Structures are given as structure tokens and as C-alpha cells.
Image: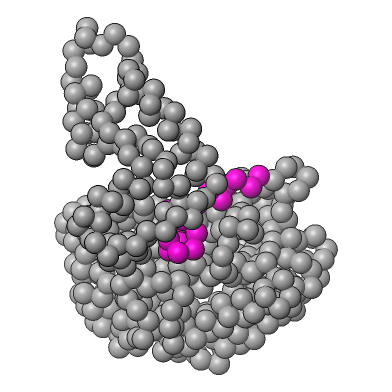
């Protein structure tokens, strides 16, 4: 459904306008791993491709992740599993097997699995309606997964959630490491894997990796039982029925992410070399918006859309604790960790100049263009120059330098370009 893709254009209503360019990145907070860190530096040769198993593969994310991983590692190296029968197109797209918690070990051994993506979980709204089932699936089920992964030396990815934060968590920004204390069983049962994974990592060397997902917006796969699900359902109901009943208050601002960004972030954290991970669990974020924002945006495409608000108190209470602002704004925090050396001089341009130059070249009469490709430049400066300039306005700003060798190497190649441009 093409309407769902319109969500990508929500940046202006989502409170991260000028940061939109960063919205496609994994926003590890600067203290830990730089956003969009060059995780792809690890490449696998044909023979050392990981062998991947995805549990609960028929949920919102499994099929999409399998597609992405198969492109990277080969069709037969990625096995989807679930307790349900897959639709024909999924069955035909690559290996699929039945898996419940009882046969996990057998599957891992027989298929020479090296990476396990554990997507089995009950989401927030259904979890709150059935607490003991949420504990069984999200907590008890997890213990078996941890043991199998440890015993067989697997890389284990389990997603956590913004629901792992609670009313006492700092809201703006919400760092990776802070008080959590969620109030819904879903959140509690997701803090548990975060801590157990961390513990197994330190105690037994388990390669545990985890991202706290926000609400995920997808078109061809449905979420089920979450508080953020309204933001997917509204597109379907708007297109099919022209009206939508929202179970959250119109002003409930929740963190969200487009599915492709979520899958890419997952792949990046899976591929990251162990030495760049300073923690086991990271926040990721792109945008946040309210039901009212989304309603207005969809109405630009479907002007007759009718939305009514019938607030469900359980979902509303869960949603209110999701209202965290994960994006770590260096200005708000008063500190910034720079991943380049302080003296790395790079060519830069203010956006207005770039747009003006683009317009000028577009409008130029053909006869004045002697070539097809031109350099443009305005200024160049180092992180140190910028730090000093910003400190003139924010005297308390703290900047530390933790050089990322990959970015530094790329930056240095651009340093040469910068002097070449200036010499012209
Ligand atoms: C939910 O709302 O339960 C999930 C989530 C944010 O983890 N979508």
C-alpha cells in the first residue's frame, strides 16, 4: 500500500526537522557507538557466511529481515521458522521450518546455525491482557534461547523496545543507560532479556546484541498486539474503509520507525565487529508523531478520511510511558563525542548555498556549460574549529574525541579533496 510509504515523508511533523538526514541512521547515543557507524566493514566470504535462524519468522519483521539477510548471505543461509504454516510466497522464498521452544537445540545443531534472531514475543497490549502468557513467552522462553545460544556459541539478537522504559526514565534525551522501571508486563519482560543478555555476555562470553525498537511502520506485514499498532492500522482502514477509530488520545506522541530503517539497523548491529560494541543494548530512533499528526498527513492524500478517538485506558497508559525522546541532541545534553580527530579538516557547505548552487546549475543555459560535472566548495574547517565556534555561544559545551578509525580514514581521503578544491 503506497500510502504507508508516505510515513517516510513525515519528518517535518515529527519534531526532528533539521535532523532528518540522520533519521535513517542507527542513532546510537554518542557516548557509545557513533550513529551510522561503519558496521559494514565486516565482510563475509562465501565460506564464512553466517547461518541464520529467525524465530517467530511470520511476525511483522521476520520475512523482511530474512529477505535482507538472504541478499547479503545467500538464500539457503537464512532459515525462517514459526509455529504457523507460512503463506505460499514465504514458503517459496527460502528455507522455512517449524520451530517451537522445544526443538530449538535440534534445529541449531542440524542446520549449523551461527546467528539466532529471536523475534518470539508477546507485545504490549496483548501482554497486559494475559500477563502469565507474556511471562511464559517473553521470560521463560528466553531462558532456553540463552542456554542454546551460549552452548553453541551463537551470536544472539533479541529486540527490546521503547516499552522497556517507564515513568521514571529520563525523557529528553533518553540515554541507552538509565533508570528503566517499566509499568507494563511487556516492558518488564523486555528489560529481563536485556539484563540476562548482558549477564550471559559477561559471565559466559555470549555474543548478545539488542536494539530497543520503537513502533515499526510496515505495509505488507501487520504488527499484532502492540500499542503503536494504530500507526499501521490507520493506513489500512483509511484506504479500505475511509475511517479509523483510534484507541489512543490524539496528542499521544510515540517514537516510530519505518520498517526498512529498522531492518537495516538490525543488520548493522548484527554485522558490527565485536570490538565496536561498547554495550549490548542500544536505543534506535528516527521520528515521533501523534495520532493527530498522522491523521492530518494522511488527510493530505485522502481528504475524506474520518478519524474518531475512543481511548482505551490500558493502551493509553502504556503509550504514555513510551513517550520518550531518544535522539540525543548534543546541544541539549551539553556534551558531544566526536568520532574524528580534532584536526580533521573537511569541506563543508551550508544547505542554502548548496541549494542555490544546484538551482544555478539547473538553470544555466546549455551553452555556458563547458563540462557536465563541476566541484563546488565554500569553506572547510576542523572539529576543533567548530567546537571553539559553538563554545562562543554555549561556553559549557564539553567535547571529547573518540576517533573511529573507519570514519577517520574516510575523512582523511576527503581532506585531500578539500585542498584540491580550494586550490582550483
Ligand atoms: C508495542 O507497541 O508493543 C510494540 C513496541 C513499541 O515494542 N510495537
Q: What scheme was used to colour the molecule?
A: one colour
For the point 45% across and 71% down, the residue is 176
**Would residue 174 appear left or right of 306 to someone viewing this image?**
right
Look at the picture and state if 389 lies above or below 396.
above
Residue reaching furthest to the right: 110
Residue at point 41%, 43% (across, down): 343
Q: Residue 314: tell me if it is visible.
A: yes
Magenta stretch, overall SS: loop
Does residue 250 appear left or right of residue 43 in this picture? Answer: left
Instruction: Please tell me which residue lies in front, 251 or 222.
Output: 251
Q: Is residue 101 visible?
A: no
Q: Residue at position x 68%, y 82% from top?
A: 143
Is residue 36 magenta-colored? Answer: yes
- The residue at the point 76 percent across, 48 percent down is 48
Quadrant in which the C terminus is drawn? top left
What range of the chain is rendered magenta?
25-43
* Location of residue 119 in the rendering, given as x and y in whole percent from the top left corner: 58, 69
Q: Is residue 154 magenta?
A: no
Instruction: Please state which of residues 324 and 73 is positioned toward the viewer in this rendering.
Output: 324
- Residue at the outermost bottom position: 132
Q: State the image quarter where residue 97 is shown.
A: bottom right
Q: Position of residue 56 (x, y in %)?
A: 60, 69
- Image quarter for residue 29? bottom left
Would you say 212 lies left or right of 88 here? left
Could you say where residue 102 lies in the image, as x and y percent from the top left?
A: 75, 79
Total labels: the figure holds 0
Give whichever of 293, 267 is nearer the camera. Answer: 267
Front-lying residue, 34 or 415: 415
Q: Percent x, y for residue 14?
A: 26, 61
Amino acid at each position: 500500500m503506497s500510502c504507508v510509504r508516505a510515513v517516510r515523508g513525515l519528518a517535518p511533523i515529527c519534531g526532528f526537522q533539521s535532523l532528518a538526514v540522520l533519521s535513517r541512521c542507527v542513532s546510537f547515543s554518542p557516548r557509545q557507538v557513533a550513529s551510522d557507524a561503519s558496521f559494514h566493514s565486516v565482510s563475509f566470504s562465501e565460506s564464512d557466511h553466517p547461518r541464520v535462524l529467525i524465530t517467530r519468522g511470520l511476525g511483522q519483521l521476520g520475512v523482511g529481515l530474512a529477505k535482507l539477510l538472504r541478499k547479503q548471505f545467500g538464500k539457503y543461509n537464512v532459515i525462517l521458522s514459526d509455529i504457523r504454516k507460512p503463506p505460499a510466497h514465504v514458503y517459496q522464498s527460502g528455507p522455512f521450518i517449524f520451530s517451537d521452544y522445544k526443538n530449538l537445540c535440534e534445529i541449531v545443531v542440524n542446520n549449523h546455525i551461527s546467528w539466532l534472531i529471536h523475534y518470539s514475543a508477546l507485545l504490549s497490549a496483548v501482554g497486559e491482557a494475559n500477563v502469565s502468557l507474556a511471562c511464559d513467552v517473553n521470560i521463560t522462553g528466553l531462558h532456553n534461547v540463552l542456554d542454546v545460544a551460549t552452548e553453541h556459541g551463537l551470536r544472539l539478537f533479541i529486540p527490546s523496545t521503547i516499552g522497556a522504559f517507564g515513568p521514571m526514565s529520563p525523557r529528553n534525551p533518553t540515554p541507552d543507560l538509565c533508570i528503566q522501571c517499566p509499568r507494563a508486563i511487556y516492558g518488564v519482560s523486555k528489560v529481563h532479556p536485556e539484563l540476562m543478555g548482558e549477564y550471559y555476555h559477561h559471565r559466559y562470553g555470549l555474543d548478545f546484541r539488542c536494539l530497543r525498537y520503537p513502533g515499526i511502520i510496515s505495509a505488507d506485514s501487520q504488527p499484532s498486539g502492540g500499542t503503536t499498532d494504530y500507526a499501521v492500522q490507520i493506513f489500512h482502514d483509511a484506504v479500505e474503509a475511509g475511517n479509523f477509530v483510534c484507541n489512543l488520545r490524539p496528542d499521544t506522541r510515540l517514537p516510530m520507525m519505518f520498517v526498512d530503517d529498522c531492518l537495516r539497523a538490525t543488520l548493522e548491529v548484527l554485522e558490527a565487529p565485536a570490538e565496536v560494541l561498547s554495550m549490548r543494548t542500544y536505543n534506535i530512533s528516527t521520528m515521533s508523531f501523534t495520532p493527530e499528526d498522522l491523521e492530518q498527513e494522511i488527510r493530505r492524500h485522502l481528504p475524506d478520511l474520518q478519524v474518531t478517538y475512543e481511548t482505551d485506558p490500558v493502551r493509553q497508559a502504556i503509550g504514555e510511558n513510551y513517550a520518550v525522546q531518544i535522539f540525543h541532541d548534543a546541544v541539549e545534553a551539553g556534551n558531544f563525542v566526536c568520532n574524528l580527530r580534532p584536526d580533521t579538516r573537511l569541506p563543508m557547505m551550508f544547505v542554502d548555498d548548496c541549494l542555490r548552487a544546484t538551482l544555478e546549475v539547473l538553470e544555466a543555459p546549455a551553452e555556458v556549460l563547458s563540462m557536465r560535472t563541476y566541484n563546488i566548495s565554500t569553506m572547510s574547517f576542523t572539529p576543533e574549529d567548530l567546537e571553539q565556534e559553538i563554545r562562543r555561544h554555549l561556553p559549557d559545551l564539553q567535547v571529547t574525541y573518540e576517533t573511529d578509525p573507519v570514519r577517520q580514514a574516510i575523512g582523511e581521503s576527503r581532506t585531500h579533496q578539500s585542498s584540491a578544491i580550494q586550490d582550483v
